[in-house]
Image (spheres, rainbow, N blue to C red):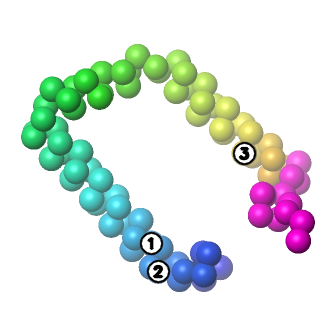
Amino acid sequence: MNEFLGIPMAAVAVAVLALLAVVPGIVGFARFRQPILFEIGVRNIPRGRAQSILIVLGLTTVIPSRQASGIPPAEESRYE
């Protein structure tokens, strides 16, 4: 598996690492530039803890069960 959608995996890895470096920088810049808007945006994160836990548990059970049962991914189940 040297390509992903026709793009070399090295280029994909560089792009993902670049995004991982840029996004926290943007969030940090917004935190100091407009702290009130940042606080308004972040205040609901701890409030939805139960819902977040349910989503993570659901994803961790559905994805492995699909793989174990042999249900093909979406791109393999399309008819041409």
Please, what secondary structure does the residue beneath circle 1 have?
Answer: helix
Cα distance between the residues tagged 1 and 3: 23 Å
Please, what secondary structure does the residue beneath circle 2 have?
Answer: helix
Report if the CB atoms under discs 1 and 3 are less than 8 Å apart: no
Report if the CB atoms under discs 3 and 2 are less than 8 Å apart: no
For the point 47% across and 73% down, which residue is it?
12
Image quadrant where one finds the N terminus: bottom right
Q: Nearer the viewer, residue 25 or 60?
A: 25
Apparent side of residue 38 relative to residue 19 in the rendered image (left or right): left
Instruction: Give the farthest residue toward the front.
Output: 80
| Residue count near mark 2 (Cα–Cα under 10 Å), binned few <14, some 14–19, many ≥20 | few
The segment highlighted magenta reads 69-80
Considering only order in the chain, which callout, 2 or 3, is on the residue closer to the N terminus?
2
Report if the CB atoms under discs 2 and 1 are less than 8 Å apart: yes
Q: Amino acid at mark 3?
A: Ile
Q: Nearer the viewer, residue 77 or 18?
A: 77
Q: Nearer the viewer, residue 19 or 40?
A: 40
| Residue count near mark 1 (Cα–Cα under 10 Å), binned few <14, some 14–19, many ≥20 | few
Apparent side of residue 25 relative to residue 34 in the rendered image (left or right): right
Q: Name the residue beneath numbered marker 2.
A: 10
Apparent side of residue 41 relative to residue 6 in the rendered image (left or right): left
Image quadrant where one finds the C terminus: bottom right
Q: Amino acid at mark 1?
A: Ala
* Residue 74 on the magenta span: yes
Q: Name the residue beneath numbered marker 1.
A: 13
Q: Which mark is residue 78?
A: none
User: Residue 47 appears at what percent x and percent y?
Assistant: 40, 16
Q: Name the residue beneath numbered marker 3.
A: 63
User: Residue 38 appears at what percent x and percent y?
Assistant: 21, 32
